Every structure is written in structure tokens, then in C-alpha cells.
Image (spheres, rainbow, N blue to C red):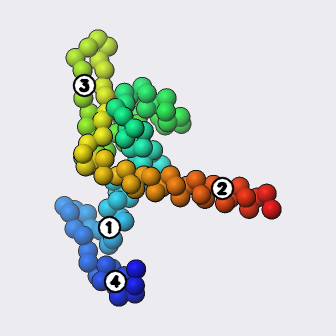
Amino acid sequence: MTEEQLRIAESKRLVRGDKTYSTPIEVTLDVIGGKWKAVLAYHIIQGPQRFSELKRLVPGITEKMLTQQLRELERDGVVSRTVFAEVPPRVEYRITEHGASLQPVLAAMCSWGREHWQQSAASTND
């Protein structure tokens, strides 16, 4: 990005409801930022997931935090939640069409993370 483009981008504020963003990156981080949301979206984008499957796939997340993060992803239109009328009740999370548009972002994050990990491993072996 050129200096001129950066100045133009910085001068535009994004306002939605009671939130004001300085850059589109802030919007993205608001939706998938934090420790868990991108990880959950990564797993759900692979295919529909049940709550218990997500709990198993994301060790370290508490049930309370998992519930909260899934609700936020649902609120932001990234995932949809389906409750099946069964005993015991079954809940399934699917990526929405809008959420599927995160696939290149998550792929880029995976690629960068892999490269960073390899670079870090190589530099500690020097």
C-alpha cells in the first residue's frame, strides 16, 4: 500500500451502530479476533460440527467460553446453529455462506502460522 493509499484509508472511519472502526482490519478482528473464534471457524468451515465435537477439537476452551464464542459467531452471521428435537438435544453448527468467505483469510493465517513456526524452529536450532 502506498503512503497516499494509507492516508486515504486512515481518513475513512467505518461506523456501525455504536462501534467506530479506523480500519477494515478492526472489523475483521471484531468478528474473528481473540483466542478462539478463528479456531472455531476453522473447524466449522471443514464441515458441520456438534458442540461436543468442538469442545474436543479445541482443548483448553471452557464450555462457557465455547458457548459465548459460538453465539458471537452466530450473531455476526459466520455460523448457523441448528437444534434437533431429539433426546438428548443435539445442536449442530454450520458455516454460513458469509462465513465461508473467511476461508481464504483462515488459509492465509494457517500458511503464515506454519511458516512462522518453521522459521522460529529454525532460528532456535542455530
Q: Earlier in the sequence, mark 3 or mark 2?
A: 3
Q: Which amino acid does label 4 sit on?
A: Gln
The CA span between labels 3 and 1 is 33 Å
Residue that carries the numbered disc 3 in the rendered image: 83
Instruction: Report the amino acid beneath label 3.
Output: Val
Residue indicated by mark 4: 5
* Most foreground residue, 91 or 17: 91
For the question of whether residue 43 can be seen, the reply is yes
Q: What residue type is labelled 2?
A: Gln
Mark 1 or mark 4: whose residue is earlier in sequence = 4
Marks 1 and 2 sit apart, C-alpha to C-alpha, by 29 Å
**Which tag, 3 or 4, sits closer to the chain's start?**
4
Q: Label 1 crowding class (10 Å Cα cut-off): few <14, some 14-19, many 20+?
A: some
Query: Which of the two labelled residues, at mark 3 and mark 1, occupies the earlier sequence position?
Result: 1
Q: Mark 1 points at which residue?
A: 24
Q: Is residue 23 left or right of residue 39?
A: left
Which mark is in front, 3 or 2?
2
Q: In which quarter of the image is the N terminus?
A: bottom left
